[in-house]
Image: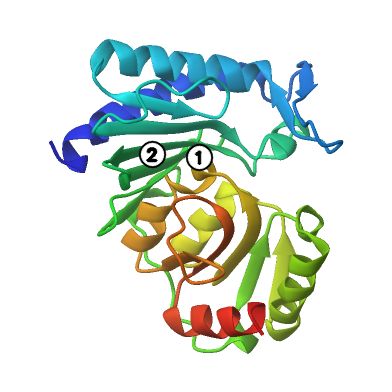
Amino acid sequence: MTAIDFAAFVDELAAVSGETIRPFFRSALGIENKSRSGGFDPVTAADRAAEAAMRALIKRTFPEHGVIGEEFEAEHPDAEYVWVLDPIDGTKSFICGLPAWGTLIALTRRGEPIYGLMHQPFTREHFSGDGSDARYRGPAGNRALRARACATLKDAVLLTTSPLLMSDADRRCFSRVEQAVQLSRYGGDCYAYCVLAAGHVDLVIETELKPHDVLALIPIIEGAGGIMTTWDNGRPHGGGRIVAAGDRRIHAQAMALLNG
């Protein structure tokens, strides 16, 4: 089967998760801090309920597939096809009532992401991609996603969730890029990568990411004509320190400053 064969099913997963999450958004919900290092890493009942609902649908429809999620133990992670789920990417925005969050759903085959979806159930937007094509569906209609051209950092718009999430050393490296761009903005999590794919911004730089934070976004960025790597120009599949760009020219310039 191809990614196209699974696209309708991914929409089902998005619908199930969205129906589960929406009643929790901007409500009085309980929040648990799952950080073991003294930081703040929130998880809510909405995260767990949405992931449980998606897992149940996958198990019922494709019992031979594996599932890796943020909130529960992995199931059959060595299967040919594995679903990678992040029910609410951007939980801190979610608990603050801000709409810069989304559900990430990736389908991998032998470790390679072949289809990715970012679903924002509050704004009712879908950003999807298969590595060669990327699409938007939402209140603004249905259209192809295309990253925009940007030749130099001085003309670029840069996003990151927050430099405070970076180590001191990484923050200093990030600052070199931030000082070179036209504009930088903070916040966004997965939404930042989707507006890059849509051609609204040029660069996203982050650190401390997990595989479930990036695997759904790789085929969206690449399908829109962008590039996504680690800071040392490696494969982004494992997360860590990530650079996404709409144009390879500013990707190279950002990499030079990050590693300078």
Give the class, few, some or many, for how many residues have Cα within 10 Å of label 2's Cα (few <14, many ≥20): many
* Residue 89, picture quadrant: top right
Asked whether, in this view, residue 31 is left or right of residue 6, the answer is right
User: Residue placed at 46% from the left, 31% from the top?
Assistant: 85
Which corner quadrant holds the N terminus? top left
Is 159 or 80 nearer to us in this picture? 80
Where residue 119 appears, x then y in whole percent? 47, 37
**Disc 2 on helix, strand or loop?**
strand
Amino acid at circle 2 = Ala
Q: Which mark is residue 61?
A: none
* Foreground pick, 15 / 175: 175
Q: Are marks 2 and 1 in contact (CB under 8 Å)?
A: yes
What residue lies at 64% left-to-right and 44% top-to-bottom?
A: 100
Q: In this rendering, would 98 be left or right of 85? A: right
Which numbered tag is attached to residue 106?
Answer: 2
Task: Choose the circle earlier in sequence order: 2 or 1.
Answer: 2
Residue 74: name its quadrant: top left
Residue 143, image quadrant: bottom left
Vertical order, 56 against 175 (above or below):
above
Residue 26 against residue 131 in the figure, above or below? above
Asked if residue 175 lies left or right of residue 223, the reply is right
Q: Which residue is mark 1?
A: 212
Image coordinates of residue 112 in percent, x first then y, are 31, 48
Residue type of the residue flagged with mark 1? His
